[in-house]
Amino acid sequence: MTELTLQECQRVVDEWVTTIGVRYYSELTNTAVLMEEVGEVARLMARLYGDQSFKKSDEAYDLADEMADVLFVLICLANQTGIDLTAAFTQNMAKKTGRDRDRHANNPKLRTINDLQLPINNSLQGVPMSIDLEKVLNHTFQSAPSIYGEDDAILYALSVGMGANPVDPAELPFVYELHGSGFQAFPTLAVTFPFTLFWQIVDVPGLSFNPMMLLHGEQSVELKRPLPPSATFTNHAHITNIYDKGSGALVILEVQTLDETGAEVALNRSSLFIRGLGGFGGDRGPSASKANQPPDRAPDAIVREQTQPNQALLYRLSSKDRNPLHADPQMAALGGFDRPILHGLCTYGFAARAVMKTFTGYQVSRFKAMQARFSKHVFPGETLITEMWQESANRVIFQCKVAERNEIVLANAAIDLH
């Protein structure tokens, strides 16, 4: 049987009941059966994860099978009472999001490395979670190409807000290939390069986890020279460290990008937090970053810019990051959001533009490196406020806030310049 949506599950159960099962039990009988099946799940949970010991009679029971029994009876009741579970679940997640987002986010007992997410047990939907440090750290990803042309560079620039004013002379060189001063690729295009091989993380030997448990915590990128208008590069990646944070594992992924001569062009480092994978006995690693804290004074410059309602749909094309969380309302609801959210790296690009325009006049040759921590989500259409402090001639500390919610969405952030 292929993957089923909730709607398809309701149809499959109805067909089974009305053919093999002959007819539905009464609603009251099915309610009693549901309670019985939930009791079976509770009994197994107490033995598997609680303090009770197993009895000989429990060894033949399968937790996943018992949960499937609960789901079956619940679907029967939904069919009998005329409830569309897809619509009901989507509405319920939206209700939970509106009611509980701030309450849970402000509960210190639930915070993890990323304030957006909640800790969860070491498995989800039957996916085992385990880690073998030696295997993981000795694994090298299969190299993958990054090939882009002028159209790709333009699409990326548009997806991070370039050209909102179509006659801005400072931005036209990034969105018009025939511009008189010469066409240029914006530096943070380089953060899209790892996505040609990022998917391989789910196949790393010794690292077993549910992809839904993975969060992008921090990102840094360093350019060795300005990006050309078009190029063919090769990406090489490996995991350099894994830290045991208790509630999860912090994975440091390094991606080196080389040109056709083998010279290094860019170096990306991603901090990835896998919820539920902690407790494996590894090094806890460094504490939460205290770097790049804004000084205790007013910002030297502030840039305010509104994202577009379709910003995420545009960015997913330019970045090759097709995570459905950024496009599919139902997937967003499963993630606890009432609508799709913007890619953190899209906000990253907006902030880079603000700094580069303010302090260099978009001189891309001055871009050296950038780092930031993703601290909150952004909804497409919200207004980004980038506050900047010039620490020296070659370093700018910044933070990015959402005006509508007055929340910091990029923190511990800085750009280093040549």
Image (cartoon, rainbow, N blue to C red):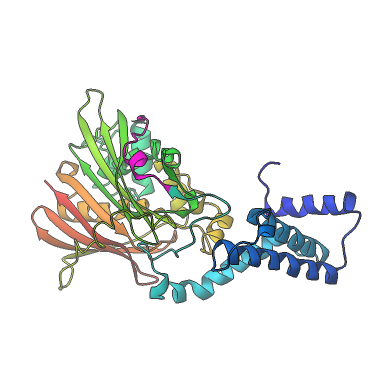
Q: Is residue 206 above or below residue 403?
A: above
Query: What residue do we see at 26% from left, 52% from top?
Result: 352
Q: Position of residue 124 (x, y in %)?
A: 54, 55
Asked where in the image residue 317 lies, by quadrant, the reply is: top left
For residue 62: magenta?
no
Query: What residue do we see at 65% from left, 66% from top?
Result: 43
Which one is in front, 384 or 142? Answer: 142
Horizontal arrangement in the rendering, residue 114 relative to residue 413 (left or right): right
Which one is in front, 392 or 85? Answer: 85
Asked where in the image residue 366 lies, by quadrant, the reply is: top left
Residue 148: in sight, yes or no? no
Q: Residue furthest right?
A: 22
Q: Position of residue 236 (x, y in %)?
A: 30, 33
Residue 58: in sight, yes or no? yes
The residue range painted magenta reads 131-145
Q: Name the image quarter holding the N terminus.
A: top right
Q: Residue furthest front?
A: 56
Query: What residue do we see at 59% from left, 56% from top?
Result: 330
Q: Position of residue 223 (x, y in %)?
A: 20, 40
Q: Position of residue 395 (x, y in %)?
A: 13, 55
